[in-house]
Image: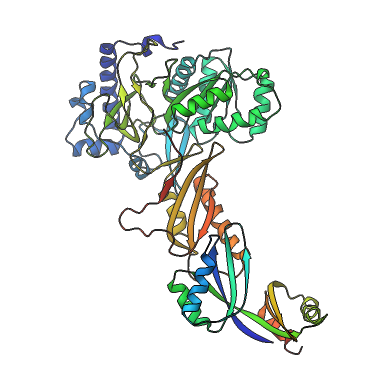
């Protein structure tokens, strides 16, 4: 488990806006290893884990995107039944609230990004897992 | 029917004499009891004795809404507060509305003027009038209310909001006339069609519509949908409230109560008086008002005047429909709104950039107001909820300042044009043709 920086981009609900973000990342030579998109009626928030947070942030801001960075927890766990449940049980038992999470699995490993309300507390609980 | 034949049908000559006499007394009064006017007249080197006829009005100073704000709350009042029996206020920039005070005599003139309107619309003591204008600081509700009572009709003090109940009571109480904004009338027409009660169970025949500009097309639509005769009533709180002018059965311009309110049309740029027939800014002098008499008040409403005799028999000068404003005031659902009011709210909130765009539209006959704002760097969040909270926060502030619900749209940084001189702050998609 590690604490890493996640980059969030405010995106209006208009066709082609996400493409604009990916274009800028491409031009800056920045790789996106995970992302999720949260949506509301008028706008969305693209949350992503990138190879160069500061570089991506600067490039997006220069292109007039509204961006913010947040600490999130990146967890690797085995890609098999019950593994995710074990992680969530630890947090639920201690009343740590999760704002959102997203995940992808690849072969033997599943990678999970968790955004708890209290990052430090969650990190502490999961350190020994 | 003509409510006050001697006044509404006065010969041109008699009227001029009466207006001149009233102006002379008015100027005498404000010079001695309102320091603001005394100072202005002294600056212009005009003394009360210089005003001998109504033609001398052009020598007098203008009054603006800003003057009313600068003299907030009571400095333009010409009588002691013991003589004031009613206050009304119009919405203004944050915390500073414009206040008007009425003496008992002022209220009697107001009732008389509104009764003239209702009578011109064909109403009499047998009519039951549902007043759907807001009651309160806004002059619409109470203005009509006292007029109906003065006429001898029956008033249903509905106030605004709650369309279903309004329709039910108009049905049950046998309302014969409806007073509200024309856009609300259209909204009501659709609701009435869908309410399940057949039209012939309603007794509605007269519509009394004002507080916002409207068009002949809207009149046709309202008349067809509601099956009534729709009439325009015009007014503004600074001058009195509803009843400053009104249409007659000819529906060809609104007759101004020019024995009480002397109208002029001036060029909004040079302030030079323009002849009848030319379009310009409408200016009123309140010839008989006691509480807060105003000399040459600039309404910022653009229209033209017509003094040719009307087929109805009235000689009272007619004003055309309002074709626009000489300032940036918007009228949304009957509520007056200046972009600067919205600006003042946004400037107070650190979460937003000091730029905005207002998009005004009319959907299902109701005005909509969208306010586009950009969140300031540092206030963006990874959580939808946080962004929604920002939106709610600004919506609540705007609601309390404007008295009007606005849809807030958060847009990406740099989307809104930055002001270079005159930035386009308003897109009004409503068509008035």
Camera-side residue: B177 or A24?
A24
In the image, residue B66 above or below residue B423: above
Report the front residue among A6 and B44. A6
- Left or right: B339 as drawn, with respect to B280: right
Q: Residue at x 50, y 14 (%)?
A: B122
The picture places residue B358, in percent across and down from the top left corner, at: 45, 50
The residue positioned farthest toward the front in the image shown:
A107
* Vertical comparison of A83 with B332: above or below: below
Residue B18: percent from left, percent from top: 29, 16
Whole-percent x and y of residue B354? 42, 60
Closest to the observer: B280 or B424? Answer: B424
- Quarter residue B343 falls in: bottom left
Residue B75, by quadrant, is: top left
Where does the C terminus of chain B fall, quadrant-wise?
Answer: top left
Write the residue at 57% across / 29% down. Answer: B132
Query: What residue is shown at x 62% (from left), y 60% (from top)?
Result: A40
Above or below, B421 relative to B146: below
**Residue A64 locus on image (x, y percent):** 45, 69
Q: Residue at x 49, y 73 (%)?
A: A23
**Along the line of sight, the residue nearer the viewer: B5 or A108:** A108
């Amino acid at each position: 488990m590690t604490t890493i920086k996640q980059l969030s981009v405010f995106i209006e609900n208009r066709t082609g806006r996400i493409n604009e973000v990916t274009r800028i990342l491409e031009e800056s030579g920045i790789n996106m290893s995970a992302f999720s998109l949260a949506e509301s009626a008028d706008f969305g928030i693209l949350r992503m884990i990138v190879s160069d947070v500061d570089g991506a942030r600067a490039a997006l801001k220069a292109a007039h995107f509204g961006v913010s960075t947040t600490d999130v927890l990146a967890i690797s766990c085995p890609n098999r039944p019950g593994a995710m449940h074990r992680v969530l049980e630890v947090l639920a038992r201690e009343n740590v609230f999760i704002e959102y999470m997203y995940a992808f699995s690849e072969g033997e490993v599943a990678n999970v990004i968790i955004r708890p309300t209290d990052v430090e507390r969650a990190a502490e609980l999961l350190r020994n897992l | 029917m003509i409510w006050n034949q001697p006044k509404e049908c006065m010969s041109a000559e008699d009227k001029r004499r009466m207006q001149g006499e009233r102006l002379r007394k008015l100027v005498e009064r404000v010079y001695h009891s309102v320091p603001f006017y005394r100072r202005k007249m002294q600056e212009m080197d005009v003394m009360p004795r210089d005003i001998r006829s109504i033609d001398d009005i052009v020598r007098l100073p203008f009054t603006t809404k800003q003057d009313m704000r600068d003299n907030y709350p009571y400095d333009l009042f010409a009588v002691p507060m013991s003589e004031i029996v009613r206050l009304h206020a119009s919405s203004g920039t944050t915390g500073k509305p414009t206040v008007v005070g009425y003496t008992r005599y002022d209220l009697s003139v107001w009732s008389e003027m509104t009764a003239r309107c209702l009578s011109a619309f064909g109403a009499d003591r047998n009519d039951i009038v549902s007043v759907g204008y807001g009651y309160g600081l806004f002059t619409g509700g109470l203005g009509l209310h006292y007029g109906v009572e003065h006429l001898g009709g029956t008033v249903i003090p509905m106030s605004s909001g709650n369309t279903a109940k309004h329709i039910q009571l108009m049905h049950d109480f046998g309302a014969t006339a409806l007073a509200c904004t024309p856009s609300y009338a259209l909204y009501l027409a659709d609701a009435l069609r869908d309410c399940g009660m057949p039209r012939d169970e309603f007794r509605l025949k007269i519509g009394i519509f004002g507080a916002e500009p409207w068009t002949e097309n809207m009149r046709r639509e309202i008349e067809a949908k509601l099956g009534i005769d729709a009439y325009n009533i015009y007014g503004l709180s600074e001058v009195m409230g509803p009843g400053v002018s009104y249409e007659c059965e000819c529906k060809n311009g609104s007759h101004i109560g020019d024995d009480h309110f002397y109208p002029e049309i001036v060029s909004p740029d040079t302030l030079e008086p323009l002849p009848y027939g030319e379009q310009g800014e409408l200016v009123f002098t309140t010839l008989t008002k006691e509480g807060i008499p105003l000399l040459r008040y600039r309404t910022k409403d653009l229209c033209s005047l017509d003094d040719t005799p009307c087929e109805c028999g009235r000689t009272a000068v007619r004003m055309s429909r309002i074709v626009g404003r000489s300032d940036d005031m918007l009228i949304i659902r009957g509520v007056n709104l200046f972009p600067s009011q919205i600006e003042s709210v946004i400037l107070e909130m650190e979460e937003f950039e000091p730029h905005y765009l207002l998009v005004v539209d009319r959907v299902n006959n109701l005005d909509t107001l969208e306010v586009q704002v950009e969140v300031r760097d540092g206030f963006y969040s990874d959580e939808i909820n946080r962004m929604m909270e920002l939106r709610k926060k600004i919506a609540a502030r705007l609601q309390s300042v404007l008295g009007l619900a606005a849809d807030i749209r958060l847009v990406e940084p740099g989307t809104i044009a930055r002001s270079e001189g005159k930035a386009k702050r308003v897109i009004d998609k409503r068509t008035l043709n």
